[in-house]
Structures are given as structure tokens and as C-alpha cells.
Image (spheres, helix red, strand yellow):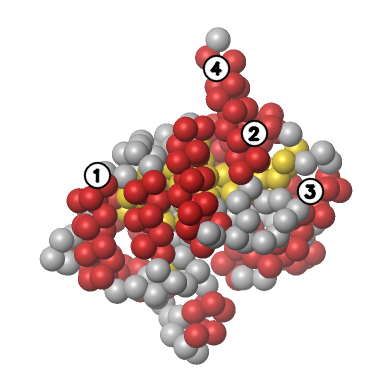
Amino acid sequence: MDLSGVGVWSISLGYGDPAEAAEAAAELEELGFTAIWIPDVGGPVLDRVELLLGATRRIVVATGILSLWEHTPAETAAAFAALSSAHGDRFLLGIGVSHSLVVDAQEPGRYQRPLNAMATFLDGLDGADAPVPAADRVLAALGPKMVALAAERSRGAHPYLVTPEHTRIVRETMGKEALLLPEQTVILCADAEEARAIGERWLRGYLSLPNYANSLVRLGFTEEEVTAVSDSVFDAVIAWGDEEAIRRRVDEHYAAGADHVALQVLTADQNPSAFPREEWRRLGEALRLLSLRSAT
């Protein structure tokens, strides 16, 4: 399972038109991306994993992340075994605890003791009829306790909505052996004003969730900066500009200890079912050419 290089994190690949998702996945593989990450926002996420694996030959397909509140360990382990048997070692099971506002909206009071819930879910995967190997799973981890659990009981961490500084801290916490696979949101645009027009409302929505807001406060931002989505917060979380600007942010994550970076592209079209295929092509070509330039 190749978890080096750069991947694509995309809600549209998870929930957009199935035929276009399959076609786009095959193109991402040809563009040189090494992994596709899809979220779990309700619905048959593992069915979409199967579709994407069937449409490709080499690329890793990962859940970024599968919510442990929406699936049982037994059904997850059985699905993992079936997908791995059919498609080889290309499915990476990313698992997370989601957010209290999301989980409790469906069943008030259900979101309790998330660290314990994760440990219990991993116990279930270990004890299933066909266990999910620790080497084939990663955890969504922002805070130090979940990061430590990721290093102890999985292949590593897949942090979302983070900065290179967060990557550096997580690498120090996990040590050298565990994989570190952060998501990085990007906007291909001409200037800061355009970037703000595209990304501010999106980012404000995420920062209303305590997990993400608290993560940025731990990094040294003030609560006021986070609430206001200050320029410093926006620029730290979202990489914007031309292809070389995006590459510089990817390199910052690598320098901080990342093994792989999953790029989530935002565009002016805020439809979550829209596929930013032109932006993926631009980034794929630029990352390939810049890699060749760096090698020489």
C-alpha cells in the first residue's frame, strides 16, 4: 500500500454521481495521485469505496473518515475483509469519532467519552471473525490523547483541517514509525480576496465545531481569532494561490513530518456534488513537474 506522495480528499467522490466518480477516480490515478479519501456523512460509504476500488488499479482508497457511531465493528470488519479480498491491499480504513453536534443531532446524549468509544471500536475490530489489521487502519486525531491512541493501535493519524505546525507536533507525539497523513484544504486562485470569497463561509462552518476550534487554540490562536476567522487563521488552515503556492504548503507538511498529504480543493462552486476536475488536473500536472524539477 503506497501511502507516500499526494492524495485527493473529496466529498464529491464519495457522494457525487457514481459514474462520474468512477471516471474521475481513474483519471486521478493516471494523474499520479496516490490515494483517494472520502468522508462518511451518512449513507453507504463502504459501497462507494467498493465502486472507487473497482474503477482503479493501483491507487489507495481511504475513508477520511468512517464515523464509528454509524457502523458496528463487526459489519466494518466484514466489509473490510470482502473489499481487501476483491481488490488487494488498497483499502485504508480511516476511523473517527465525528463531532458531538453531528452525532447528538440524531440521538441526543449519544456522543460521550469519544476516546473510550474509539478504543472500544478498535477492540471490536480486533475481535471480529476477520480482524482488521492495525496496519490497515488510521485514526482521525487532533488532540494529544487521540494521537497517542493512533500511534499505539493503528498505522497512524489522518488529521483534518490542520496546519504544518500541527503536523510537526503530531509527528513528535507519535514518533518516527507511525504514518502521518494530514488533509490540506487548497484554493487555486489569483489573490486573497478571491480566496476569502471562496473559502470563508466554508471554514467558518467547520470552526463552529469545538474539535476544530479547540485544535487551533492549542496551536496558539486566540478564541477571538478563531471565531472571527482572522486572516492569520484563514491563511494557516487554507493554502491558496497558484500551483507553486500549493506545492510550498505540501512541502511544509513534509518538512514537518508528514508521509502523505491529502488535498481538498475548494472552488467557487460550493455544490458538494461537483467534481473539481480541472483543478485536480492542474495540481496533478504541477506537482509532477515540480517533483521532476526538484529531482534535477
- Residue depicted at x 54% and y 77%: 102
Q: In this view, does 233 lie above or below 69?
A: above
Of label 3 and label 4, which has the lower sequence position?
3
Instruction: Report how far apart the C-alphas of labels 1 and 4 lie in the structure.
Output: 30 Å
Which sits in the foreground, 166 or 159? Answer: 159
Task: Name the spot of residue 227 as percent of width and height, x first.
Answer: 75, 67
Which sits in the foreground, 131 or 109? Answer: 131
Are the residues tagged 3 and 4 within 8 Å (C-beta)? no
Instruction: Report how far apart the C-alphas of labels 2 and 4 lie in the structure.
Output: 15 Å
- Point out the residue furthest to the top here: 296
Structural crowding at the residue carrying mark 1, measured as other residues with C-alpha within 10 Å and reported as few (<14), some (14–19) or many (≥20): some
Looking at the rendered structure, the kind of residue marked 4 is Leu
Select label 1 or label 4 by which is in front: 1
Residue under circle 3?
195
Residue under circle 4?
292
Are the residues tagged 2 and 3 within 8 Å (C-beta)? no
Task: Name the spot of residue 125 as percent of width and height, x first.
Answer: 23, 64
Of label 2 and label 3, which has the lower sequence position?
3
Select label 2 or label 3 by which is in front: 2
| Label drawn at residue 75 | none
Identify the element where label 3 is drawn.
helix
Of label 2 and label 4, which has the lower sequence position?
2
| Label drawn at residue 282 | 2
Looking at the rendered structure, the kind of residue marked 1 is Gly
